[in-house]
Structure formats: structure tokens, C-alpha cells
Amino acid sequence: MANATMKFSSRQLLNRLYSIYQPLSRRQKRYLLIATDIFLFCVSIYLAFFLRFETVFPLWEISEYVWLIIILFAIKLLTFRLKGIYRPIIRYTDVEFLTNFVQAIFISSAISIVLAYLQGLWPIPRSILIIDAFLTLFLVIAVRLLIRWSLQNIIIYIQSHQTPERLIIYGAGAAGYQLVRALLNDPHYCPVAFVDDNSELHEQTLVRGLKVYPPKDLPKLWQQNKFDTVILAMPSIIQKKKLGIIENLQTLSIPVKTTPTLGEILSNKVAIQKIRNIDITELLEREEVAPNTKLLQMQVKDKVVLVTGAGGSIGSELCRQIALQQPKCLILYELNELALYSIDIELAEKFPSLQRHAYLGNITNEDYLKTILIRYQVETVYHAAAYKHVPLVEANAPRGIENNVLGTLIAARCAIDAEVKNFVLISTDKAVRPTNVMGASKRVAEMIIQAFAIQPEMITRFAIVRFGNVLNSSGSVVPRFRKLIAQGKPITVTHKEITRYFMSIPEAARLVMQAGAMAKGGEVFLLEMGEPVRIYDLAEKMIRLSGLIPGQDIDIEITGLRPGEKLYEELLIEGKNVKPTKHQKIYSAREHFWKWEILQPELEILLENARTNNLEALLVQLCRIVPEYQPKNSLIKAMAEAKSKSEIIPFS
């Protein structure tokens, strides 16, 4: 009983010391270690005098050489520092550090002994220096090993009381080995085994006695409660193979996480032990489109660039991608103060040498925007400012028209007046045969750009980029699904058969930049999006990757299509006139539109209805300008068709 109490008390003491030591900064820990070494030097020199003079209290002898002892200590500390003794973190060091200690103490003692040979300058007995060297070596190494052992035992003690997450490492290669080595010192994780497809590794024992199992043994290990999570430790694996592994794991409803990609590790962005959730892009059956560096730089490098809607999902990523291509100056134009501040401070930290200016402003403020374009002689404009949330725009149609249609009209006119060379409108697949006000408003915005592009002697080169849903953007289903799963609430899907195209935010931003570089005027650029994804399937995958079972742990509820929502989206109004471009995954198309002399008076009617909040007249006029618009109210469509007299002039 006494032994148990003593053991418990010693652990409590160690735990208390660890709680004091752990919050200290690296510099504070280094100073603490230096102070410990000075104390050990004092003990060592005292014992050296004790053994040399055979006196229990050799204070008089020590006082005779006090200044020489101080110089000796300084030589030791300087040598230790030069040999990098204080750089490593003790609990992560291996026994290799012993070599450095031996060398440091040998060098410092050799210097002291050489000085001792200089008669009159260093009268301290040489035998004391030799004894002191051996004692210093023993004491310093012994204390280092004791500290290391104590820290490791404290971590084990904490682990035993915190129940760390037990991990299966999928991948017994170099990445898996390094991951396990890194996680062994982390109290939150406990690697228990490897899994690998390579049959030659099965049943082998790797680092710290961890065994390698075949993937078919995962269900048995899961049922035996051997682990909590599977970690994919294969940073260089191709997307197709990785997707296959993820799909196999989904059938078991096992929580799956992954390590950083090989590019992130090699670029020193993150360490391999930074475990994260599976990114949604890893669930899509398509490779992310690789960018063409030359096209990325064409309209950006050494140029003055302005981004409207710079604080939004696409706008902010555009700013990041533009900053990477070294523009002469980047101008951020945004209405939302917090969004503008966030992207501005981020760019300031990541790109300190980037010349940039942040402006708070509404895209409909024509004089203000034109002043900025002229002041900085802007060469390229990326127009990302828009209202894009379908239900909100449907319920606030006049405001959606003002922002998406009038905003684009004003931005384009300002660009023409300021003689901007390039103007790129960021559009959406919802503009194709729209069933909602948001999509129809973006189609009108496209028609404005198309009409301006063919104006005689037009200096500004206009282009349109159209793409599907952007993952993790402010309007994406993915963050919503993730939040509901974390809260244990049912996921809501509007229809079981609803499908959408998806791409990542960086991919979308790069598409905008590359497409703009290839524009000759008035084209609609499209990205090869692969196959559309069923939202219901996406929800199931996200639930299973969280280690839960759809319909059992998390329900998926069908709520019905929202006003203006389509079952599927398209990227083209017509399948004709689609042409390849310099980029193998980007295509261009020419689509019908109204010439400016026909479009202008129709726009004036539309915008006047928006200004006066005349909803019925606004929708009728919207149907008239965009004949393929199919509003929910069929009466509105019939009124527009009866009223329509103008002919749509196809582009030739």
C-alpha cells in the first residue's frame, strides 16, 4: 500500500512539474536548460576539487580559482551553443545526441587544458580539469536522459487517463512509418496497426511492434474495437486509386481521415502528422484540372488588376491566385466591410511585398468605381460581385436584378470609359435555361457583356466564364452537411435525384484567370466538369466517412425542390459552336444574344421595374429578355410571350 501511494505521489509530482513546464515557450525552456547545465557545472567542479584535495568542503581551494572557474563555465556554455546542444527538443531527441555532447565536452575541456599549459595564465591544476570533464560528461548526459524519460512517462500517464484516439494507418510505406514516429509522442493519438495492399508486407512487424494487416481484416478489427479511425498515409497516391480505397472504407462506415498531400509536405506548408478530415474534392470522380502557368500570368503578371466582390468565396480566392502571379498592383473592391478586412489582412501577411489597395464600395456606385479604375490605370477587371443564393434572390428579385444586372452594366461601362484592356465576368451554370431569378439575372449580365464585346472600335476585351457549383463556398451544401453531421442532426436534401457539377474554389479561380487570357471578345468559357454528382450520394458519403450509418445514425430527409431550383444544371444553352482552346480542359462557345441597340431599351424597362419594386412587371420583362427563362408562375411566362415582339439576333 505504501509503495502504491509513493508511486502515485511521484506520478502526481511529475504531472505537476509537467503542467508547469509544458506552457513555457521554446526560449524559456532553453534558458531553463542552460540554468540546469550551469548548476551541473558547479556540482562537477565541486566534486573535482573534492576528489583532488580529498576535502569535504574545499571552499578555500575553490575561492582561489573562482575567476578561472567562471571562464571555464563560459567556455563550456559557448561550446555547447556552437555545437547546437540547446536546439533540439529533449523529448523528441534520440540517443544520437550523445555524440554531440561528447564532442562539446571534449572540445571545451581541451581548450581549458591548453590554457592550463600556459604557465602563469591558467594555474588551475590540470588534474582537476580532467576530472571535471568526465564528471560534466556523466552529469549532463544523465540529467538529459532523466528529463527525456520523465517526459515520456508523463505522456504515457496522460494517455492512460485521456483515452487517446486509436488509429489504423492505411499505408505501410515511408509516409506511414514517418507518421507513426511523429504520433508516438502525441498524447491524443495511439497508432495500433498498419493496413496495406502489398501482400509482401502482411504479418510483418514494423516500428514499435505495429503489425501490418491486409485490408480484408479491417471489418474484423473494427468489430473487435481495435481502433477508432483509419488514417490514409499515402500522400503520393493517384486520385483514382485513393477514391477506390475511400469507397471501400465507406461500406464499413468507419471514420476516415488523411495526411497532407505530398505537395504540401514537400513545400513545408504542413507536417505529415497534421491529420485532417477527407476533403470533399477527394470524393469526386474527377481529377482537378491542372493550370497552364503561362495563361495564368498573361493578364495578371506585372499588371494592375481589380477584383469586384473581393471578399466573397470566388473573389477572395481570385485575389490569392492573382497575388501568386506577381501583379504590379492588386485592388480589392468589396461592399462587406468584414469580408474586405479579412482578405486584405490575409494578403498583407502572406504577400508582404504585394502592392494592394482595399476599397469599400457598392458595384452600382458608378462614379466611385470609375474614379478608382482611372486613378490606378487598371488593366484587368475580374467581376465577381453578385448575389448568388437562389432562394434569397427569388424572394428579393428587385435587389437581385439591381446587383447582378445593373452592377454588371455599370462595371462594364466603367471599364470601357477607363479603357480597361480586359474584363472577365464570372457567371454560373444556373444562367443556362434558368428557372430562377438568380440564374436569369446572370444570363442578362452575360448578354450585356456579349453586346458590349461586339461594339465597333471596342478597346476593352470582354469574356464570360461559366462553371458549376464551387465546393466549400458560402452557398455550398458541403459546409452545411458537415455542420449537421457534427451536430448529429438529419441532413436535408431537396430531391433524391438532384445533381450538380462541382469544382474546388482554387480550380474555379484559376479557370477565370486562364479563360480571360484566351478571350478574343464575347466568348463563353467552360470547364470540363466531368460527370455530375448526385447530392444524395454526396450526403451518404460524408456520413459514412464520419463513421456513421445513413438512416441509422444520421437521417437524410427529402424536403422538396425550393422555388426556382432545378433537378440538374447545364453548362450550355446550345450544344453548337463549342470549340477547344489552348487548354485541353477549357472550351469556348458563342451563344445567342441581343445586339446593344435592341437590348438597351429592354434593360431600361427591367431596371425601372426593379427600382420601383414592380415584381410582376419585372418578371415579365425578365422573361422577355431571356426567352428560355422558365419561372414557376406560368402566367408570367405567357404574358411575356404575348408581349414580346422583338427578335433575338444570333451572333454570327
Image (tube, helix red, strand yellow):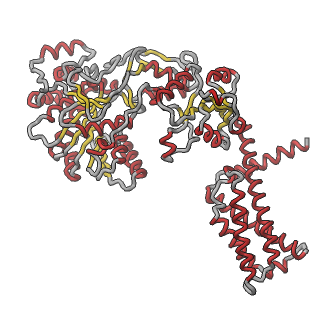
Residue 311 visible within the image: yes
Q: Residue at x 62, y 34 (%)?
A: 172
Left or right of 212 in this view: 501: left
Res 579 quadrant in image: top left
Which quadrant does the C terminus fall into?
top left
Which quadrant does the N terminus fall into?
top right
Q: Nearer the viewer, residue 562 or 417?
A: 417
How far across and how far down the image is residue 200, in percent?
Answer: 64, 29
Residue furthest out toward the front: 200
The tally of labels here is 0
Q: Residue at x 26, y 21 (%)?
A: 434
Residue 298 vs 560, above or below: the answer is below
Res 210 quadrant in image: top right
Residue 563 vs 613, above or below: the answer is above
Res 560 quadrant in image: top left
How far across and how far down the image is residue 206, in percent?
Answer: 68, 36
Residue 420 vs 524, above or below: the answer is below
Residue 445 visible within the image: no
Residue 25 vs 544, above or below: the answer is below
Left or right of 576 in this view: 16: right
Left or right of 309 in this view: 271: right
How far across and how far down the image is residue 19, in percent?
Answer: 70, 49
Q: Residue at x 25, y 29 (%)?
A: 580
Q: Nearer the viewer, residue 233 or 343?
A: 233
How far across and how far down the image is residue 301, in percent?
Answer: 29, 49
